[in-house]
Image (cartoon, helix red, strand yellow):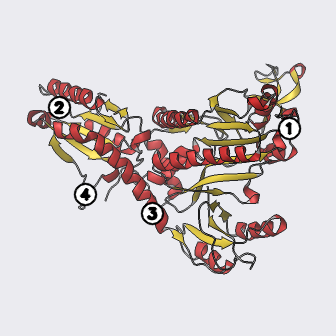
């Protein structure tokens, strides 16, 4: 079967990923290493993610703020563990003016050196902590729940669009609480928000759980994540939520006067998701014809393509398409009006059709003279593009029938994508591996897409954990997380020989 892309997932998954982005017209290189231009279709998906996530954030009583892009270096120096975790990724501004070098170029003006270097934010705990110290005086000011939508910069050595870029877009929630219990409840609320958003909105099944000690956010007491399985079996950390304890509060001076009049340190949290979610969406739902976008985040859920012949029928076809667009726009799915797009560009209808296939529009409708004459529509469902014989599974039916069931169709596509991804993930989790050698063999013995391995382990810490991590690194493996609400496993930990106390997933990852 011939597909729209020149490379398939099975031939070269990495090259396929890059081609999906290019052919779906989602993003392109910017001329700055590790930075990308996000084009309208890619940014439209991000806008949908942002709008739907922002509604959930605000529903939890969190208020949006904005904090500066530039953070004084001294703010980071107050939190040694935090700065150490980001030091190799920080971009630093040292001058505020350029001058001519006398050779037709520009150089930093030695007279314009800043008194204190400014870090381009890699994350905002330090600068937000300084604000919280000013805003919080009494127990009456707690909890303080803030969020910002922003860009951050982490100077990555190896970059890949949407997955790992030097600059990326995200939201970062930062909260302060009177005690550990309240902070932990907020941290877990954010984690559940991410889990349900990924499952229900992105149709991307995930496992929510706690990261091991070596994978904690720099300076955090505990870190939790959602982990998704991509079609090549690798894991993608799709969102994180951190309980920061009182460490950041102590370094920033975030204190409150309690009901007894005592000065007490706040307990803080931070949590975030980024444009990495789009990379996860591509690798979860894309196929050999391009992207498939879950309807809830598709900028256009239904695209209408007129099949024009440069003859007297064209005016009637255009009028029919516009009428259909208006009718469908009155239909609601997921409690919103359908997002319907009429593609009137002056290019061949077949090129438009395959362009929208590669972009992953959930439903593509083609209208020609015969459809108008018969009062019909001809449409393709992007999640089920081909029939059993390998031909395009085009459906022809009366226009009124499609309009009547358009809402159910869109919701069915959303559910279908989630079911497909869940079935694939569950089929690629291996259990019953009883030794480190067997684990290594699973990931090396000609197994192209080995998926994840579920193990019981003894939750080692410190030097014992580092020994485990070293053994896993030798096979390019990582511990993803300890899934929540899973029964305590029986047997021994294959790494330490001690009784297993919890379950972990081991995988290769992005």
C-beta proximity under 8 Å, tags 2 and 1: no
* Residues packed near mark 4 inside 10 Å, few (<14), some (14 to 19) or many (20 plus): few
Disc 4 to disc 3, how far (Cα)?
20 Å
Mark 2 or 1, closer to the camera: 1
What quarter of the picture does the C terminus occupy?
A: bottom right
**Horizontal placement of 331 versus 63: left or right?**
left
Residue behind mark 4: 387
C-beta proximity under 8 Å, tags 3 and 2: no
Tell which circle, 1 or 3, labels the residue nearer the N-terminal end: 1
Name the residue located 43 percent from the left edge and 42 percent from the top edge: 24
| Mark number, residue 264 | 1
Identify which residue, 47 or 90, lies in the foreground: 47
Residue behind mark 2: 309
Disc 3 to disc 2, how far (Cα)?
43 Å
**Horizontal placement of 370 versus 122: left or right?**
left
Mark 3 or 2, closer to the camera: 3
Residue sticking out furthest to the front: 260
C-beta proximity under 8 Å, tags 4 and 3: no
- Disc 3 element: helix
Identify which residue, 224 or 328, lies in the foreground: 224
C-beta proximity under 8 Å, tags 2 and 4: no
Tell which circle, 4 or 1, labels the residue nearer the N-terminal end: 1
Residue sticking out furthest to the left: 373
- Disc 1 element: strand
Disc 1 to disc 3, how far (Cα)?
49 Å
* Residues packed near mark 1 inside 10 Å, few (<14), some (14 to 19) or many (20 plus): some
- Disc 2 element: loop
Regarding residue 249, the answer to whether it shows in the image is yes
Residue behind mark 3: 424
Mark 4 or 3, closer to the camera: 3
């Amino acid at each position: 079967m011939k597909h729209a892309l020149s490379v398939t997932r099975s031939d070269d998954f990495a090259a396929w990923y890059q081609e999906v982005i290019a052919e779906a017209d989602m993003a392109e290189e910017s001329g700055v290493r590790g930075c990308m231009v996000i084009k309208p279709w890619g940014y439209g998906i991000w806008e949908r993610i942002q709008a739907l996530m922002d509604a959930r954030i605000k529903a939890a009583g969190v208020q949006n703020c904005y904090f500066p892009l530039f953070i004084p270096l001294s703010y980071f120096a107050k939190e040694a563990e935090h700065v150490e975790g980001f030091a190799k990724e920080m971009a630093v501004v040292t001058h505020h003016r350029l001058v001519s070098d006398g050779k037709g170029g520009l150089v930093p003006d030695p007279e314009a050196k800043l008194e204190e270097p400014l870090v381009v934010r890699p994350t905002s705990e330090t600068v937000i902590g300084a604000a919280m110290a000013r805003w919080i005086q009494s127990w009456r000011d707690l909890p303080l729940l803030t969020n910002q939508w922003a860009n951050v910069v982490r100077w990555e050595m190896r970059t890949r669009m949407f997955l790992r870029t030097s600059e990326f877009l995200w939201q970062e929630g930062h909260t302060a609480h009177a005690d550990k219990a309240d902070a932990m409840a907020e941290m877990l609320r954010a984690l559940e928000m991410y889990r349900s958003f990924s499952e229900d909105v992105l149709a991307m099944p995930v496992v929510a759980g706690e990261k091991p000690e070596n994978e904690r956010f720099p300076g955090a007491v505990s870190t939790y994540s959602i982990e998704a399985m991509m079609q090549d079996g690798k894991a993608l950390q799709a969102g994180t939520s951190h309980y920061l304890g009182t460490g950041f509060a102590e370094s920033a001076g975030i204190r409150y006067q309690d009901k007894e009049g005592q000065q007490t340190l706040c307990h803080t949290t931070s949590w975030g998701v980024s444009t990495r979610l789009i990379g996860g969406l591509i690798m979860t739902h894309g196929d050999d014809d391009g992207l498939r976008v879950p309807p809830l985040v598709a900028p256009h859920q239904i695209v209408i393509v007129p099949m024009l012949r440069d003859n007297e029928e064209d005016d009637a076809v255009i009028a029919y398409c516009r009428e259909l667009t208006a009718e469908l726009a009155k239909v609601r799915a997921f409690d919103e009006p359908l997002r319907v797009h009429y593609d009137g560009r002056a290019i061949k209808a077949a090129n438009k059709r395959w362009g929208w296939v590669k972009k992953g529009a959930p439903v593509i409708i083609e209208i020609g003279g015969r459809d108008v004459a018969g009062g019909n529509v001809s449409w393709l469902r992007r999640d089920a593009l081909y029939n059993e014989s390998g031909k395009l599974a085009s459906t022809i039916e009366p226009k009124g029938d499609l309009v009547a069931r358009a809402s159910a169709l869109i919701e069915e596509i959303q559910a279908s994508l989630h079911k497909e991804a869940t079935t694939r993930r569950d089929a690629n989790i291996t259990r019953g591996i009883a030794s480190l050698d067997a684990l290594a063999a699973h990931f090396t013995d000609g197994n192209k897409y080995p998926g994840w391995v579920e193990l019981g382990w003894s939750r080692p810490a410190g030097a014992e954990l580092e020994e485990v991590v070293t053994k896993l690194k030798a096979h390019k493996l990582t511990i993803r997380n300890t899934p929540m609400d899973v029964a305590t496993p029986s047997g021994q930990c294959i790494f330490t020989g001690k009784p297993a106390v919890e379950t972990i997933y081991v995988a290769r990852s992005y």
